[in-house]
Image (spheres, rainbow, N blue to C red):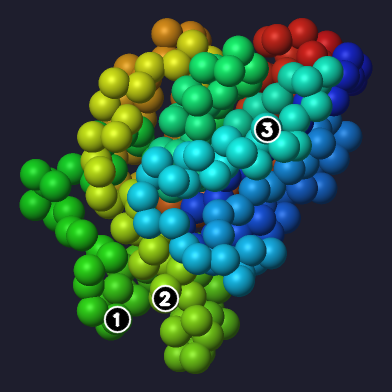
Amino acid sequence: MIFTINKKVQLFLLHFAGGSSYSFDFFKKYNSELVDFLPLELPGRGKRFDQDFLDNKQSCVQDYVRQIKSLRNKDLPYIIYGHSMGATLGLSVTFEMEKTGDYPIQLIVTGNSGPGISYDLEDEDSKIRYCLNDEEFKQEVISLGGMPKEVINNDDLFEFFIPILRADFKVVETNLDYEKNTVIKTPIHALMGSEEKHQDKIDNWSEYTIGHFDYDILNGDHFFIYDHPQKVTETFKNCLTNTGVLY
């Protein structure tokens, strides 16, 4: 099928725990003709390495909103996309952007079954990971996948990432009711890996939008997106087609 681009779309990408603005470089090439690719990052990593970590959702959401506002071209529509931690924060970021009257055309979330599910402390398997000792914490991180073997097998390199990971896990594992009454008008499309815990509860996201909701389950673990960059791109394309940006 040949698509005609009515206008480019700004795509704001919110990284996962331990990630940075470089985390989505692996599928940038699939989207260059469709979008202005705008990966964001929180303080304490990447280009913002010299800045102090944020340790709560409200501060992270406000930081992301400031970044988006500073980069917005209001002549263009935009999408917010987040993976894992980025998905959780993406809901509240979208909510705050809606308050300004500048609505995304879509919120796309991956690797996350939505608020109230992923960190259910009544679940006997749940644990506060950011409080674990270094060895237990390392094993938890490894179990999620997505961490390069070069990092896992290099103690010094892994030690470098521990403070970043702990700060990010603290953000998502505290103030669990932050999104409780957050309902957006923006449509949501969710994707999860078939091997992810709680992938069977992905439709939980439908409780957080009065707009259209859809989802897909793809083969893979928590970082299935690395194996399916083209499928994620198809999700962007479908969004653009449905809104008349791409035809």
> What residue is drawn where x is 61% and y is 69%?
49
Where is mark 3, residue-wise?
69
Q: Nearer the viewer, residue 100 or 226?
A: 100
Look at mark 2 in the image and give the residue it sits on.
162
Image location (x, y in percent) of residue 59: 44, 46
Q: How far apart are marks 2 and 3 (CA)?
A: 30 Å
Task: Tell me which amino acid carries mark 3.
Answer: Lys
- Which quadrant: the N terminus? top right
Rendered view: 150 above or below 217: below
Q: Which of marks 3 and 2 precedes in the sequence?
A: 3
Q: Is residue 74 above or below residue 157?
A: above
Inspect the image, locate mark 2, and give the three-letter code of the amino acid beneath it.
Ile
Q: What element carries label 3?
A: helix
| Mark 2 element type | helix
Q: Which residue is disc 1 drawn over? A: 134
Question: Pointer 1 and pointer 2: residues touching (CB < 8 Å)?
Answer: yes
Which three-letter amino acid code belongs to the residue tagged 1? Answer: Asp
The residues tagged by marks 1 and 2 sit, at their Cα atoms, a distance apart of 8 Å
